[in-house]
Image (cartoon, helix red, strand yellow):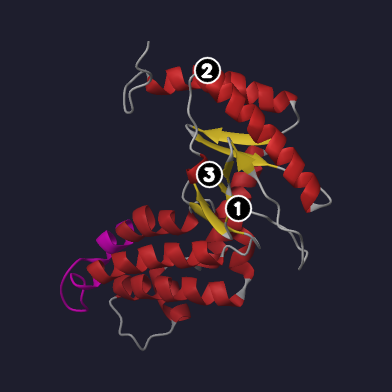
Amino acid sequence: MTIGCVQGSIGGPTFWNILLDPLLDGLEKRGVYCQAFADDVVLIFSGGTSSVIQDNANNVLAYVHEWGVKNKLKFAPHKTKAMIITKKLKYETPHIQMGGTEITLVEEMKLLGLTIDHKLTFQKHVQLVCRKAANIYKQLARTAKIEWGLNPGIIRTIYVAVVELIILYAASAWATASEKITFQKQLNVIQRGFAQKMCKTYRTVSLNATLLLSRLLPLDLRVQEAASVYKAKKG
């Protein structure tokens, strides 16, 4: 009981939920919007001015810090990040503190594998997932040539079971970004390479032709489809 929750233990998640649940209840009673997944907790504050947000955030973080001291739980303010999301071009920079330590303001942060930027364009997230998919394609291209190598069925399995899942992760959050031409071009580059390997075609074959021959839906439409399915299940 004095050691705490051992990371990776069977009972660790249950003990952690029991420990953290009173804090989440306290934040909810204070009207704070929060989401928690294991030890990743997100707090969202809104207001008409940066000073209002600053006061609300500092008051809540002071409560969190006091709760941690009372329950012998140490938080890491130096690892905590804050991000301002606004459509205004100019605003006063808020100063947010926790336990006497200044919280660093960033323009983007990674939350459970989803990269969120301060303008909610999700440009960095699309770049990262396309880079992951491109690395997989480079490895696949070495073993899948036109006349020899992996057969189209195996390539399709790899694409559907691995590549599409990487691209479609958290699609409900950034589906609107897939409507932009610049993002569609990035997705098309990734999909074209895999489609050509499935059809055993040359590089000169167009994207539309390879998608038709490989019976694949364009990735931007797959992203929107995945987002609509998620919203339908949630609703």
Marks 3/2: CA–CA distance? 19 Å
Is residue 154 covered in magenta? yes
Looking at the rendered structure, the kind of residue marked 1 is Ala
Q: Which residue is mark 3?
A: 80
Q: Which residue is mark 2?
A: 71
Q: Which residues are magenta?
A: 141-157
x and y percent of residue 13 in the render? Answer: 42, 23
Marks 3/1: CA–CA distance? 22 Å
Confirm whether residue 180 shows in the render: yes
* Numbered tag placed on residue 192 in the rendering: none
Q: Residue at x 24, y 67 (%)?
A: 140
Q: Residue at x 62, y 72 (%)?
A: 180
Q: Is residue 168 above or below residue 8?
A: below
Q: Residue at x 59, y 45 (%)?
A: 230
Answer whether labels 3 and 1 touch (C-beta < 8 Å).
no
Q: Which residue is mark 1?
A: 173
Between residue 194 and residue 43, name the one nearer to us: 43
Q: Secondary structure at mark 2?
A: loop
